[in-house]
Image (spheres, rainbow, N blue to C red):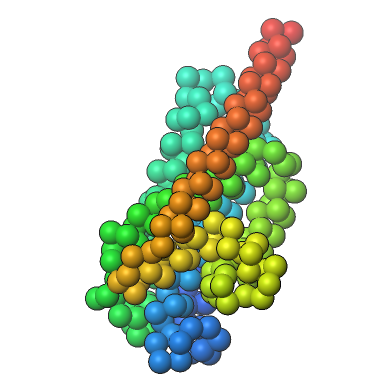
Amino acid sequence: MARNGEQLLLVLGIPVALLVALSRWRVVGDDADPMASVTPAILALAVMSTAMVSLGVSTGFERGYGVLRRLGTTPLGVGRLAAAKAGAVTIVELVQLAVLVPVAVALGYDASRTRWGWLVAGIVLGTAAFAAIGLGLAGRLRAEANLAAQNAVYLALAIGGGVFVPADELPGAIARVSGALPSHALAEVLRAASAGDAAPLGAWWLLAAWATGAAALTARTLDRKSTRLNSSHVLESRM
């Protein structure tokens, strides 16, 4: 990732740029303390960009290049591969936190009120949910289509998924749809933790439901793909 300019732009460049821009333009958040809502929104975007887009795009191209097929012939298996990717995502998110939080504090964010335990728990659960979504798309779509889909989903969730504007402040049907999305649940948890409050249980349950449901579907998809590709590889090697 350090050698990939596009990845660095996605996971660090864009979040830092948005953090600085929104702290000055007052587009979202309370005029009296804009960083109280801007900071958790940017942290939610960082989780989405790393756990879903970055992980999903790289896995999609690995699948397209036959990397997953070759790994399927080894004892690694889908479970260990997913665990390794989760570890890599965790390291990247730690770097994001180490960069974004000091920048936010320099721009006026009051970190003394933050419940760090709840914030980290929300990031972990959000990472599980969005990683499962990203891997699920990567397991179903061709590499190029997966690239487009990952970015489209990311933009849709960032704009209308309750990240910057809470779902209950959106109009009508948009509010109902937004309120059922994992981006809304993650942003709610992070907003509450940043303010020193306890997030509503509904947000935790919604985020957990997305994490478990998407993970179950993704595991089935990747298992089927790995089995099919592994069988084809074995037949080709015998011929």
Please indicate whether residue 47 sits to the left or right of residue 113 in the image.
Answer: right
Q: Is residue 220 above or below residue 24?
A: above
Residue sitting farthest toward the top: 238
Q: Quadrant of residue 163?
A: bottom right
Query: Quick check: 131 above or below 71?
Result: below
Q: Say whether residue 137 is left or right of residue 86.
A: right
Residue 60 picture quarter: top right
Q: Position of residue 73 (x, y in %)?
A: 56, 19
Q: Residue furthest bottom?
A: 32
Q: Is residue 165 visible?
A: yes
Query: Horizontal and vertical percent for residue 10?
Result: 55, 63
Residue extending farthest to the left is 112
Of residues 117 and 82, the one drawn nearer to the viewer in this rendering: 117
Nearer-the-camera pick, 91 or 109: 109
- x, y percentage for residue 31? 45, 91
Image quadrant holding the C terminus, namely top right
Depicted 62 relative to depicted 32: above or below:
above
Q: Position of residue 106 (x, y in %)?
A: 33, 82
- Image quarter of residue 111: bottom left
Residue 55 seen in render: no
Q: Residue at x 65, y 62 (%)?
A: 177
Tell me which residue sits at (69%, 60%) in the image: 152
Task: Give the residue displayed 42% in from the left and 51% down from the top.
Answer: 125
Look at 34% across and 74% down and name the residue there.
Answer: 195
Q: How many marks?
A: 0
